[in-house]
Image (cartoon, grey):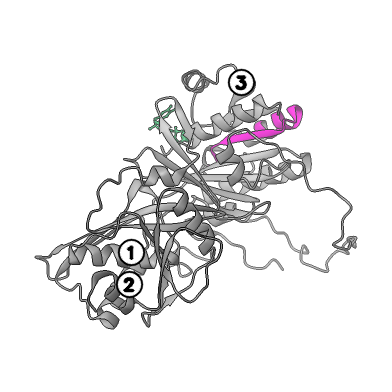
Amino acid sequence: MAKSVTAFTCTACGAAHKKWAGRCEACGAWNTIIEEAPLSQGPGRGLGATKGRAIPLAPLTSAEAPPPRSDSGMEELDRVLGGGLVPGSAILVGGDPGIGKSTLLLQGAAAFARKGLQAVYISGEEAGAQIRLRAQRLGLADAPVRLGTETNLRDILTTLDAERPDLAVIDSIQTLWSDQVEAAPGSVAQVRSAAHELVTFAKRRGVAVVLVGHVTKEGQIAGPRVVEHMVDTVLYFEGERGHQFRILRSVKNRFGPAGEIGVFEMTGAGLSEVANPSALFLSERGQPVAGSAVFAGIEGTRPVLTEIQALVAPSTLASPRRTVVGLDSGRVSTILAVLDARCGIPFAGLDVFLNVAGGMRVNEPAADLAIAGALLSAREDSALPADCVLFGEISLSGALRPVAQAENRLKEAQKLGFSQAILPEARKVEGVSGMSLMGIADLTGFVGEVFGAG
Ligand code: TYD
Ligand code: MG
């Protein structure tokens, strides 16, 4: 007998449900469960009904060379891909609508094409004329990229199978529809089936396939995890709308390190690469001001300096405001609590605003000390030295924990003209001369040393 068949799926987490409900029990999201066409699963299809074929098993050792990678010549893009494009890999590029995904991939496809790869760009969102106009504006009209506009999955696969390009960009996965799935384009069933077909095609034919995916307002790629686990590489294109900076971040990569970032600037003529992001994120700094702290961070394999800005003002509200942009607000609450409980510095009755300059997002726990520094500096109205960077993780006891890659952080800071650093004292840092280092054991010590109180 056929087991019960999934008919309802949560569009947020992909969980399967037997019946419709207003709230998904798996992830707690509301109004995300939709009906899907059931899987055709006839009787007698269970395991053991027919005898399978034994698959050959092989040792891990391999005489094969690692896959040859292709460079696009766009360094930021190549780095995020893990050192170039791997043939036959499937890549998902997610991001908010309008953030610049189509622009990035058109530029990327053109760059690869100019390096001699056969590149095909299939758009299901824009008309051919529109894309050609954009290509002209970006100065790419002469690049040997072949353009198609189609949403029918079967036609796209037939075309790609006949053409056998090296790289195929599909913009976007949400517009594709397969006539074998009875669901609307953009539904979980369609997105899953289209992604599955395209990923299988990529593996079988050695074509690198790039799928563009729009992110829903909850921050997930619609039809979400289902696509993320199918592909080899997941890249997110992020940025604040009001800022011109865009960050391409690898959150999963089977062919390279995850967490790597590439920094771009959106200009009138498309995206231009930013080779030295630290200089860019710090570029607005002038005289030392209260509430500003420079964090020496690591993004992927690369050190990046960012400025953390805090403003603390008396509040008229019963529960004061905590506005946090570019940082994890849970982390900020923890640091505020530690400052209160361990150092006796309360923020009750004070509104707190925190921001990372340049529209950057900082997720590292190593930013704790810089956050605390910015908060204290704003509260005490006393500026930190302008040529000083901070890093270190704060534990709930108030102790400062050492963080990875201290040398790399310091070297980057030194390169950009910083001559002092405040860091956890626990670890000996070698290989940096000419910088004065202040090792701190705990937050109370930090308050005492830097703000002369505590
Ligand atoms: P787009 O690549 O269409 O975004 P997505 O595919 O992620 O939806 O980019 C759209 C935005 O980028 C649009 O608001 C205009 C801006 N833009 C520029 O500023 N300069 C340019 O050269 C291009 C092509 C776009
Ligand atoms: Mg687009």
Q: Quadrant of the N terminus?
A: bottom right
The residue drawn where x is 59% and y is 16% is 142
Secondary structure at badge 3 equals loop
> Which labelled disc corresponds to residue 371?
1
Is residue 326 one of those drawn in magenta?
no
Label 1 residue near ligand 1, CB within 8 Å: no
Task: Write the start and end of the magenta stretch as one range.
Answer: 156-173
In this figure, what is the number of numbered marks?
Answer: 3
The residue drawn where x is 35% and y is 46% is 358
CA gap, disc 2 to disc 1? 8 Å
CA gap, disc 3 to disc 2? 51 Å
Image position, residue 195 (x, y; %): 62, 46
Is label 2 in contact with label 1 (beta carbons under 8 Å)?
yes
Q: Which residue is mark 2?
A: 335
Tag 3: Cα neighbours inside 10 Å, few (<14), some, or many (≥20)? some
Pick whichever, 329 or 336, lies toward us. 336
The residue drawn where x is 74% and y is 63% is 43
Quarter of the displayed picture in which ligand 1 can be seen: top left
**Badge 2 amino acid:** Ile
Is residue 168 one of those drawn in magenta?
yes
- Locate residue 294: give its quadrant: bottom left
Q: Is residue 102 visible?
A: yes
Is label 3 in contact with label 2 (beta carbons under 8 Å)?
no
Pick whichever, 165 or 340, lies toward us. 340
Secondary structure at badge 2 equals helix
> Which labelled disc corresponds to residue 49?
none
**Disc number lying in front (1 or 3):** 1
Q: Which residue is mark 3?
A: 143
Residue at the farthest left position: 316
